[in-house]
Image: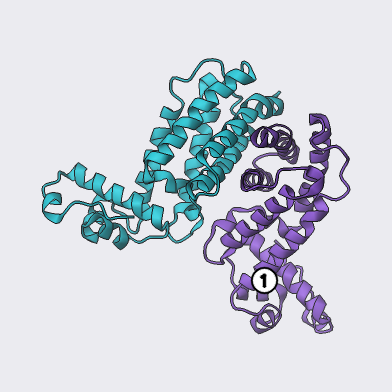
Chain colours: A cyan, B purple
Amino acid sequence: MARVSKPIEDRERLSPPQRRALILDAANRCFARDPDCSLRDIADEAGVSRQLVQLYFPGGGVGPVANVLFDEFVTQAPWLLADLPEGIRSTPDQTRARVEVIVNRGLDWAEATPGAWIFGPGRDLAGSGIGQRWEETQQAIAAMISSYPPFGLDDSPLTRTVIYAELRALEVLIHAWRTGHISREDCEAAAVLRFTSLFATTLPALTN
Amino acid sequence: MARVSKPIEDRERLSPPQRRALILDAANRCFARDPDCSLRDIADEAGVSRQLVQLYFPGGGVGPVANVLFDEFVTQAPWLLADLPEGIRSTPDQTRARVEVIVNRGLDWAEATPGAWIFGPGRDLAGSGIGQRWEETQQAIAAMISSYPPFGLDDSPLTRTVIYAELRALEVLIHAWRTGHISREDCEAAAVLRFTSLFATTLPALTN
């Protein structure tokens, strides 16, 4: 991936929030290339010193930077569920229409940002501590879906586990798409079918 | 977990295949406790020297021992699919009946052996190199299911990816059961519903 950071003289005129955003952008690109990357890799990518990265993201190592990126991902998640077509769980067709909207938003996001590394296999690498944070992130999203009132789900450990399982399956689909093993069209179709089955068949059968 | 290895004097009378099996049993227990365990941990658990473990599993580190355990897991997988009730994909009910048999066999196996660690989060730890081997193992099983003639599936990268995604979801369910977050009954029900949807709905819709 080409270095896109600005020349030094421009960066020195950046405000602190702009510098922070610059570092986060660089970190996203670094994690996308190598989830086991170092703080120095991120500093080099941003064209700043390692000390400056640590000033903005204190605590040692890449963990604090990764945490902010995961937090941003979780922050975006409710937006995926906003203003959906009415009628989830009413009929399978209505469920499918809502699922299509959610899946499309998610895949558009994955396509538009380097943040899709969050769905990569890198989270399995222990070095950066990303694995555990990834798991917490997916658990948080499962809890959000499970307790989202319009879905009318029975929010229980079982419901959360089954949704979390589906998110893990989704991660495989997105990763296969981002690495060129399947097309976006197939990724989308598979995700829509899977989530429709989950909401229209599996969850009602499990909780009734 | 209690140490179950035999006293030294007994072990010295073991044949080489028996010693090898003793070490593999010990390794299964060690990986179940700590997927990032060392060769010394396995040797201590088996009550033998580290050199003896390396003699039986040469190549360095715990990788060679883990590889054999993964190979055994893959070897058992075709048995999961043997002698199934006829009629998969004929009707959803027939599909479900076959899926129930497969899921039951798998969960019985997970309950009876310490090998269920293969479904644990430990595969996410980079230290032992288990993560990659786990992924290869699941890919091999996905390929086996995808190309298993009685299932009559369209064996393609898409089919394999969707089955692999389902295996990842199954891993979440089994791990949630083994760690006491959901009951075996719920794990079984969720797995049966999910695989039935996969075979009866998702895969036919994706490939037709």
Residue B173: percent from the left, percent from the top?
A: 66, 43
Answer with the quarter of the image where residue B62 lies: bottom right
Q: In this rendering, does residue A177 appear at all?
A: yes
Q: Quadrant of the C terminus of chain A?
A: top right
Kindly identify the residue that appears in the image at 34 percent across and 55 percent down.
A1
Residue A167: percent from the left, percent from the top?
A: 55, 39
**Horizontal side of residue B64 vs A98, given as left or right:** right
Kindly identify the residue that appears in the image at 67 percent across and 76 percent down.
B43
Q: Amino acid at mark 1?
A: Val
Check the image and report above or below for A154 versus A170: above
Residue B76: percent from the left, percent from the top?
A: 79, 58
Give the tally of numbered discs. Answer: 1
Kindly identify the residue that appears in the image at 55 percent across and 56 percent down.
B124
Kindly identify the residue that appears in the image at 63 percent across and 53 percent down.
B120
**Horizontal side of residue A109 vs B135, given as left or right:** left
Of B108 and B73, which appears nearest the observer? B73
Check the image and report above or below for A103 versus B62: above
Of B98 and B11, which appears nearest the observer? B98
Residue marked by disc 1: B65
Q: In this rendering, does residue B104 appear at all?
A: no
**Horizontal side of residue A42 vs B82, given as left or right:** left
**Chain letter for the residue marked with disc 1 in the picture:** B
Q: Counting other residues with Cα less than 10 Å from the Cα at mark 1, is it few (<14), some (14-19), or many (20 or more)?
A: many
Check the image and report above or below for A89 versus B165: above
Answer with the quarter of the image where residue A77 lies: top left
Query: Going by the picture, which residue comes out furthest to the front?
Result: B208
Q: Report helix, strand or loop for mark 1.
A: helix
Of B143 and B179, which appears nearest the observer? B143
Of B44 and B189, which appears nearest the observer? B189
Residue B39: percent from the left, percent from the top?
A: 61, 74
